Structures are given as structure tokens and as C-alpha cells.
Amino acid sequence: RGLAQVSLSLDRLKQFINAELIYFAQRPTQPLRLADIVQASTPGKVAKLVHAELPGLFAARVKHIESLEGWQQVPELQTLHEIFSDSFRELRLADPPFVEDPQISDLAEYSQVIYSLRKRHRSVTALLGEAMRKMSREDPDEESRFQSWADTFMHSRISTEMLTSHYVAIIETVPAEASTAVGIVDMRCNPRQICEEAAAQVMYSLSKTGGSLVSIEVQETDTMDDLEIPYIPRYLFYIVQELLRNSAKATLEAAHSSLSSSSSSS
């Protein structure tokens, strides 16, 4: 038996999408777990995960922007509001195919939606940064509140980026027997190697800005060389890199302060 088709006017469709956005934004959200990512190991499973999780994240982001008083007067926030509203609408109008085990070819149209929204979202971080600078400059007393608002916004972005990156990795990666990767997750991620790469990058970047005296050494335990964990290497690298960069900068500042004090007292 064929499916009945229902025609909606553009205004009616907008009302329907807006009602859905409000509904999704009010739903309680659960943190995205690494196990959820690993289990979404096939095109069909990752499409199901993205379809279930991503609309709620986008809806919450739209309402988070609207919660900030005066957002309509900040062009960058208006653009961000439009970006996430458009992405929510496209996702809700693009259901994955209703087949038991969809293949990559079955997901062609849905994949185009994911590629499109990833391209659309490339400017999000820059737009948010510019909005923060403008708002903090115009109202310095509210800078801490703006920062807290932005932190919440960016925390949700991590889950969004993780979901869409994993989708693309599953769709585009040709399975190989020797591979330890499941999408963006390396099932045998080596923390020692990640720490060494992050340390090398931080030392290099600081050497370009006068921080050549900083030396970062990764010390090993007896079992560290063989330690392997299921994790997302890219995110582990960013975490370690940020911790080391902040620590190195604090060490440099303390050393410069100590030298200045010694020079003043002599």
C-alpha cells in the first residue's frame, strides 16, 4: 500500500518546524558517551545516532542564543541563530532511509545534508569570538557572564563536531582488517604517543614567541609504553596540548617575575 502524501504551505511548514524546535530544545539531554560513538560502527547505526542526537543539540543552541538579552542587536549572533535554525530544519526534513541495514548508497541524500551543515558551521567559532569581543567591549562589567554563556555554547559544539565527524569517518573510511579505528575512535590509542606529540607542538609554538627556555619531558612508567585505551586521539591531543600550554606559560611568567624581583633587589 502506498504512503499518503500531505502538502503543507510554506507558512504552515515554518510553524511546524518551529514547534518541533521548541519541543527538541525542552527535551532533557544526556552527555554523549564514548560507548555511543563506538557502537555506531556502521553507516546505518551512525545515521540513526546522528538523527536521534543532533537535532536536539541544534535546537538547544538556538534557544541558548535567544536566552541572551539583546542578541538581536549583535550581527554575529543573528548569523549564528540562522545557521543553527537552518541546520535544524534541514535535519528534520531529511530522514534516513527506513530500511533494516542501510548501505552508504542508501544514505546518499542524508549524507549530503551532513556535509552541507558541516560546511555551514565552519564559521561558528569565529562568529562567536567576534560576538564575544563586541559584547565585552560594549559592556565590560558583564564580561564574566558573557564568558559563562559562551562556555556553555562551545561545550555543546564539541558533541556536535564529534557526531558529524564520526558520521563522515564511517561513511568515507574503507574498512581494513589491520585498522584499529572505529570512525574517529582509535580502539588502541596510545596516550604516551599523544602526550609526546602535544609536548613537541607546545615547545615548538612557544619557541616562536620567545619561550625557547621551556622544556617539556614526558616521563614514562614501566607499563606506560604498552598502555592503549579506546579514545579519540584528536580530542586527547587538544586536551593535553591546552594543559601543557597553560602550564608552560605559567612557568614562563613565574620565571620572568622571579628574575625581575632579583634584578630589582640587587
Image (cartoon, rainbow, N blue to C red):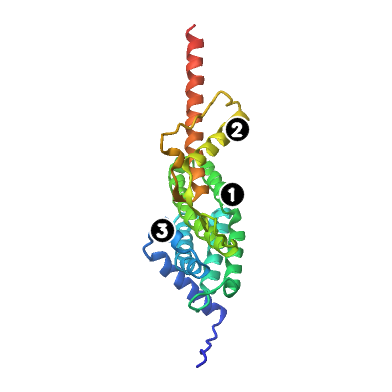
Q: Nearer the viewer, mark 2 or mark 3?
A: 3
Image position of 160 with respect to 17: above or below: above
Image position of 255 with respect to 146: above or below: above
Mark 3–mark 1 Cα distance, whole angstroms, equals 31 Å
From this viewpoint, which residue is outermost toward the bottom?
A: 1
Mark 1 touches mark 2? (CB < 8 Å):
no
Q: Give residue 175's quadrant in the image.
A: bottom right
The amino acid sitting under disc 2 is Tyr
From this viewpoint, which residue is outermost toward the front?
A: 177
Mark 1–mark 2 Cα distance, whole angstroms, equals 25 Å
Closest to the observer: 154 or 112? 112
Q: Earlier in the sequence, mark 1 or mark 2?
A: 1
Mark 2–mark 3 Cα distance, whole angstroms, equals 34 Å
Residue 82 x, y percent position in the rendering: 56, 62
Closest to the observer: 8 or 208? 208
Q: Which mark is residue 35?
A: 3
The amino acid sitting under disc 1 is Ala
Element under disc 1: helix
Q: Nearer the viewer, mark 3 or mark 1?
A: 3
Residue 194 x, y percent position in the rendering: 51, 41
From this viewpoint, which residue is outermost toward the top?
A: 266
Residue 198 x, y percent position in the rendering: 53, 38
The amino acid sitting under disc 3 is Ala
Closest to the observer: 229 or 136? 229
Element under disc 2: helix
Q: Which mark is residue 186?
A: none
Residue 138 x, y percent position in the rendering: 53, 43
Image label count:
3
Image position of 24 with respect to 191: above or below: below
Per the image, the residue denoted by label 1 is 126
Q: Earlier in the sequence, mark 3 or mark 1?
A: 3
Per the image, the residue denoted by label 2 is 204
